Amino acid sequence: MIEVTDLTKVYGSTRAVSGLTFDVRPGQVTGFLGHNGAGKSTTMRMILGLHAPTSGKALINGVRKHDLRDPMREVGAMLDATEVQGGRTALDHLQALAYAGGISRRRVVRLLEEVGLAGVARKRIAGFSQGMRQRLGIAAALLGDPGVLILDEPANGLDPDGIRWLRTLLRSLAAEGRTVLLSSHLMTEMSLTADRLIIIGHGRLIEDTTTPELLARFQDEVLVRSPHASRLATVLEAAGATVRAAPPPGTPTAGTAVRAAPPALPGTAGTWRAAAPLDAHTADGGVHVAPSDLPAADAAHVAPPGRPEADGRRPVAPPGMPEADHTVGATPSGLPGADGNVRVAPQDTRGADSNVRVAPQGTHGTDSNVRVAPQATRGADSNVRVAPQGMHGTDGRVRVVPPGTLAAGEAVYEPGGEGGLLVAGMSAAAIGDAALRSGCSIHELTPQQVSLEEAFMELTR
Amino acid sequence: MINVIASEWLKLRSLRSTYYVLACTLSALVITGAAALSISRYFDTRGLSGEIVGTGLRFSADIPPVLFGMLGVLAISGEYGTGMIRLTLTTVRRRWMALLAKATVVAAVAAVGGQVVAFATYLTAQAVVSGRPIGASLSEPAALAEVLAAGAGSAVAAVIGLALATILRSTPGALVALVALPLLPAVIERFLPAPWNDWVASLTLPALTRQLAGVPDAGGFGPFTATAILAGYVVFSLFAAALVINRRDV
């Protein structure tokens, strides 16, 4: 257990750490995140009694480091694996530390084996790679079999095997009821290893939460692939979800989409909506581009879902009879807001004719062009593009964009094959249930992974 | 505390720099040997009219304090330089324990090493003199005392070196200080009236070591005062270093 209370450290005129308060609980791996210079290392040093706090306190097992009776058996630390004297052999280095804590030679030898350095135990550390030093540092931290572990960037320089080994090790140490605090810039690794996250920036606490909670907060989309995508989209929208077309597989989206469209953007003004048929029959492939008047038009779009298909599937239950107010109410919340996003709404009742409609709503952002791109590729600008095959735009602002110029995060409709939807505001389970009730089959149902890196950057911006 | 001493003992043993420094102390033998050779030649031509060799220690008396001081410096400056001091200090209950353990280890090594070097220097001088009546015999109490005092002087030098490095936290800085400090009295004494100039000149480690042994004309203090001053050096430097290591962020 580590308790940090109102911890502050001032160096001259710099406030390295400012009123930091958090607990690191036993039985969990706690990740300590922050940019370079955020105060992580300073905080760790204060916990370890190496730096004296300007004010506040940092306690290990209820007391200051200074007051621990047998420090090596209570806390193990690795602050910087390069901070060793290279002239010594690995064995001597560990043995010297072991002597200080009255730790047996057997433990030293066992740890050298455990961290994979048994073969180089009698080699001088100067010749070690960064990864080997890292392993040695971890061995030193574990020498006293301590209940509290503090590791600064332990995964640095480890090979993939080493990282996996470290992850397993830390998780098992935590499972034994130990307190594990580790910092790392390897976000993917951190999201796999840490149960809790403490995020600091400029010496202040930004977030103290669990990893799943943090990821869930930024992860509000579920990818659904279905042969009945358009019907399913109608059903889901009726249930309050926000649905947009999924970019074709292989296009990086999830994180980008979240960043491109913060839910807090004002209203629906400037949002492009593409009412695209997601079924395969685009024989006609017409595109109507027409400005729509009001956000309330949502209701109309979401309204009666397609008729039950005649292929013997279970008829759609009362077709999500869209309580208009519900739909409208739900739309703005999850609607990808910024200009440059395309939201694919289900077909309206005339679905059979498979028109693609791009409906700019009154005011839109800087560039209101609608472009039609024959292929889904990525580009630099943020224009909205909708890509059906043949099209006859009635609006002068529709033009064809050559392939290779589509912006990241754009929704693109590709005719033919099954349809992909990105559904926000509904859990994967709820989507599955809704699909089952409406008789739509689902080929894929994947919560979109927002990486911890994205979440971290978002929080510390 | 015994544990920490064991740890520091292994640390000192496991660094090659320790052996390099110890090997360098052999230069004292070379210098004394050369001096004894030169005096022996003079004796062979001119007889007893000139200087005598005696124990031979005084020709190389400045060497062991500097080298054993360096041993003390390296015992901690290497840890400051690499950052390993942080690891060391997290493993001990109190920071001064690490310092005291290092002081114990380097003082012990310097005392033994200094003694060995002193005897070796003495034997080298007597070997070169080889029977001429210009040497000294350990059966003379004064000669034995002079040789025995050398170990104590080396131990004090090692502790001072350790303290300097703890305070300065830098290998070059501590080494410069270690070499410059003994020169200071020699500079100052020129500007002081008697008897102050004598006293200041008597404060250097080699001078105190000889005064400790009661060597005639070695300085202004008797063996007792010299012992007290040497002890004072140890206590003062350790105290200052402990204060600094306890207070300062590492």
Image: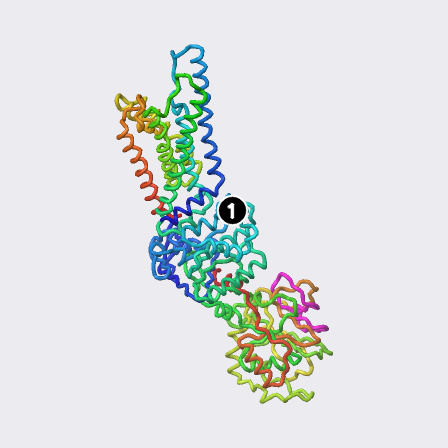
Chain bearing tag 1 is A
Say which quarter of the image contains residue B99: top left
Residue A396 forms part of the magenta stretch = yes
Q: Residue at x 67, y 67 (%)?
A: A376
Residue B28 forms part of the magenta stretch = no
In the displayed structure, B66 sits above or below A289; it is above
Can residue A40 be seen here?
Answer: no
Say which quarter of the image contains residue A70: bottom left
In the displayed structure, A292 sits above or below B60; it is below
Q: Which residues are magenta?
A: A371-398
Circle 1 residues within 10 Å: few <14, some 14–19, many ≥20: many
Place of residue A105 in the rendered image (x, y in percent of width and height, measured from the top left): 46, 53
Q: Quadrant of the N terminus of chain A?
A: bottom left
Place of residue B71 in the rendered image (x, y in percent of width and height, measured from the top left): 42, 37
Q: Amino acid at mark 1?
A: Thr
Please name the residue that numbered disc 1 is placed on. Answer: A89
Tag 1's secondary structure? loop
Q: Residue furthest top?
A: B46
Q: How many marks?
A: 1
Question: Image check: B113 left or right of A226?
Answer: left
Place of residue A300 in the rendered image (x, y in percent of width and height, measured from the top left): 58, 82
